[in-house]
Image (cartoon, rainbow, N blue to C red):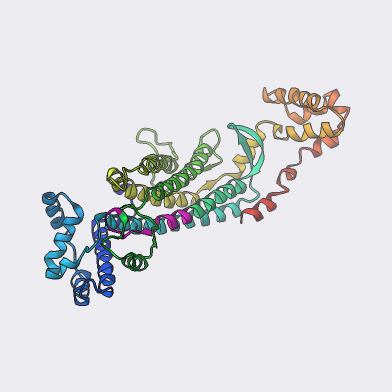
Amino acid sequence: MIERYTRKEMAEIWSAATKYRIWFEIEAHGCDALAELGVIPESAAKNIWDKGGSAEFDVARIDEIEREVKHDVIAFLTHLAEFIGDDSRFVHQGFTSSDVLDTTLSVQLARATDLIMLGMDRVLAALKKRAEEHKYTVTIGRSHGIHAEPTTFGLKLAQAYAEFQRGKERLAAARKEIAVCAISGAIGTFANIDPKVESHVAEKMGLSIEPVSTQVIPRDRHAAYFATLGVIASSIERLAVEIRHLQRTEVLEAEEFFSKGQKGSSAMPHKRNPVLTENLTGLARLIRMAVMPAMENVALWHERDISHSSVERGIAPDTTIHLDFALHRLAGVIENLVVYPDNMLANMNKLGGLHNSQRILLALTQAGESRESAYRLVQRNAMRTWRGEGAFLDFLKTDDEVKKHLSDSELEALFDMEYHLKHVDDIFSRVF
């Protein structure tokens, strides 16, 4: 957990105090169910809530006990007994440690996902607003980094919106899959605890029930969850890289907001660097780092081992913290992004109208020229423009083979920008 990339709300979910509070609630709800079943006295369940519900768990004391017993759940239960007293003997009846640990992880991941979802919503809102703003802001589309055909900056942002909307849907599904409870005892057979206890705890903690837990919740759930976070991180990086490219000096079609007093370089006072989107690229790498270990956690020995435990203690907080931070940083970048429509037009026109080459190709084939011959005619004129010898349209007008099929006025009509924008509304209606 790096404070620099941590928002307070997410950090609190993964704090030791929150973890121990959830541990207590799981144990105490379990005691309520055990009392209802007649396994423990109702007075004991009430006393456990009365004394534990308002308690401030001493993290340092629990750590001290754990150094001796070498077991985190036992250390917590020992500390709990220090202020609950004799009724503490009824706590953890029929439970195994994984019941508490895995169910707690489910609660924390579900809560973390709720915060991440708020970040997704903020990104989506920013993308929608800026897409509408630049719906008809013409810019050159690029494939392989090379000028292709015109698009609009709004369509670029609409594409990102659709991608993040898919990410949001995947995230909702991942939350549902990860938010499960397992209170099934050693090896998951319910030999020493009634399944009704699990049902009660699950309801109280806002979870569904793991149908078959083998002492631990199966880790395919966690693998799918972290894979989803990894895909969202890749979507963040894709948009961040696009903005970084657009901010390059030779392009400068958009750039991150540069605030008053901001410095871009310790050595060169003129610099305005895309530091936020570069940071997002790095954070995306950190988030995706969790995916492979989560996949490897699926294969545990027999009914359980703890090879997954150390991995999850790292990737669960770190990955959710980084993604939460990254989404809000990305939203801020989009909200404040500086866009340069004039530069977009200037860049598009640098190639003298070459973005219309496909229109000329199609027009020649419609006029009777074979595709191979039409391609040759268009390409030979386009390459002259590519070499900086003149304007594409001028070369086409003086090409005798082209003139056999297309008049000057017909050629000029094929250079109409509106042609490339005629379906922008259709695409926006699909997305929004």
**Is 182 inside the magenta-drawn segment?**
yes
Residue 152 position in % (x across, y down)? 64, 45
Of residues 108 and 220, which is closer to you in this image?
Answer: 220
Q: Is residue 149 left or right of residue 191?
A: right
Q: Is residue 65 left or right of residue 217?
A: left
Q: Residue furthest front?
A: 191
Stretch of the chain drawn in magenta: 171-187
Residue 139 position in % (x across, y down)? 63, 41
Residue at coordinates 77% horizontally, 23% vertically from top-left? Answer: 376
Q: Is residue 44 above or below residue 148?
A: below
Residue 145 position in % (x across, y down)? 58, 32
Residue at coordinates 73% horizontally, 42% vertically from top-left? Answer: 417
Q: Is residue 26 left or right of residue 234?
A: left
Residue 30 found in image quarter: bottom left
* Quadrant including the C terminus: bottom right
Residue 69 position in % (x across, y down)? 13, 51
